[in-house]
Structure formats: structure tokens, C-alpha cells
Image (cartoon, helix red, strand yellow):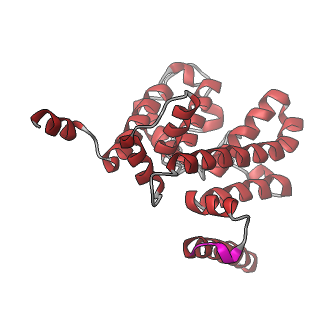
Amino acid sequence: MLSSARQKKRDFRPELVMPLGFLVLILLGMVVLALPCATVKGKSIGLFNALFTATSAVCVTGLVAVDTGTTFSMFGQSALLVLIQVGGLGFMVFATLVMRALGMRLTLHERMMMQEASGASSMSQIRRMILRYGRLAVCIELIGALLLAIRFVPMYGPGKGIWFSVFHSVSAFCNAGFDLFGRYSSLTGFCNDPLVIFTISGLIITGGLGFAVMLEMSGKRFRWREFSLHTRVVLLMSVILTLGGTLLYAVL
């Protein structure tokens, strides 16, 4: 009995595992981004700037202390992309996908954490839900990358063009706001390019709908009457805020 009680004390609760997981991920990202090989010039950006960048990437805020496009090497940009993807999908969701890819089975404790992370009502379908969401997210990001490649490959060549397409598709879907165009220019160079603007906008809106809404929309094939109240409210307010904001900017 005593050993069992001690074991329970050593077990982390789901609400503690998630923030601790994000903290560990941020610290690992800080170490990687602070390496000299993570920059174009081969000189470390320092732990402070690396910590800020890693935090911004994992928490998908898009704020930067150094120019992403001109500062980081391919290695640094790749590390940044991983941080964005994990932060955008959610730490526990990403962990589930990795475990699934490695053929590992989820324990009861891990299923409880997944349920806490996704907000699912039961544990019976939690793994299937997360796998569905992972596949859906990858498919949307791939479609976004293919559309962006139509513009970026002719501009930057096959290698750089494909990399730019993948990076910005993931960044947009995860609502991260990072870009590789350099000189803090973001998408200003594409302000009159409908393909880039509408693709990035579509990825941002789709990614911002959230885990539950995307799964319900894909499962019920966009049948409005069968949607839950939560999904209806999210979709309705997304349309109102997007169109309302567009009209307001047009008028002003």
C-alpha cells in the first residue's frame, strides 16, 4: 500500500505534464537555436534571443528578436519549423503521432493526458481522434504548400522554392506568423498576389478553427444542421469577424 501511494505521488497529473512538456520543448529549442550552426554566419545569437525565439515558435505568437530569414541557416530554420509544428498541433497531440509512428501503445495514464489535451468526452476514441486530426492537419498543410509552390518555385528555384512553400504553409496553418523572406518584410512583397495572399489567409483561418471544429466538420461533411453548438458558434463568428474586418479595412 505504501509503495502504491508513493507511486501515485510520483505520477504527474495531465494538467502538469502538458505545461512541463512545453517548458522542456522551449528549453530544448533554446539550446538548438543558440548553436553557432543554427545561424548563417556561424555565430550564436545568444541564449536570451534563442529563448525568446523558441518561446515565440512553440507558443505560435510570431514575435521575433532577430530576422528569421537572414539570421538562421537551414538547420536553424528546420529546428524552428519543428517547434512551430509541435506548438501548433499541441504537445500531447504531436507526442501521440510520434508514438503511433514508432508503433508504441498508449497506456491508460497517457490516454488520460491525451483526453485532457484534446478536450474529448471519453478515452475510448481519443487515439483515433488525434490520428484523424494529425492526418487532416498534414493534408491541409500539404495542399497549402503545393499552392504556394506554384509561385515560390519559379521565383526561388526548386530547392528553396519548395522549402519556402512548406515552411510558410506550416507557419500559416499553425498561426505562427514566422516568415523567411528576410529584412522583416513578411508578405509585403506579395500584397498584390492573390494566390499567395488567399492561400496564406485560408491556412490561417482553417488552422484557427481549432481541433474539435475541424474534426466535426470533416466527420459530418459540412452538414450545418448536424454540427454542435460549439462548432456553429465558431464558424459563424469566424465568418462575421473575417468579413466584418475586411469591410472595415476597405471602408477606412
Residue 203 in the image: x percent, y percent? 70, 54
Report the predominant secondary structure element of the magenta stretch: helix
Q: Residue at x 73, y 58 (%)?
A: 202
Who is closer to the viewer here, 73 or 67?
Answer: 73
Is residue 104 part of the magenta span, yes or no?
no
Is there any visible trace of residue 119 in the rendered image? yes
Residue 225 in the image: x percent, y percent? 68, 78
Q: Residue at x 83, y 33 (%)?
A: 156
**The C terminus: image quadrant:** bottom right
Q: Residue at x 60, y 21 (%)?
A: 41
Residue 231 sits in quarter: bottom right
Q: Is 227 on the left or on the right of 164, as rendered?
A: left
Residue 53 in the image: x percent, y percent? 49, 39
Q: Residue at x 56, y 24 (%)?
A: 38
Q: Is 247 on the left or on the right of 3, as rendered?
A: right
Is there any visible trace of residue 193 in the rendered image? no
Q: Going by the picture, which residue comes out furthest to the right?
A: 154
Who is closer to the viewer here, 109 or 61?
Answer: 109
**The N terminus: image quadrant:** top left
| Total marks placed | 0
- Which stretch appears magenta? 224-228
Residue 204 in the image: x percent, y percent? 66, 57
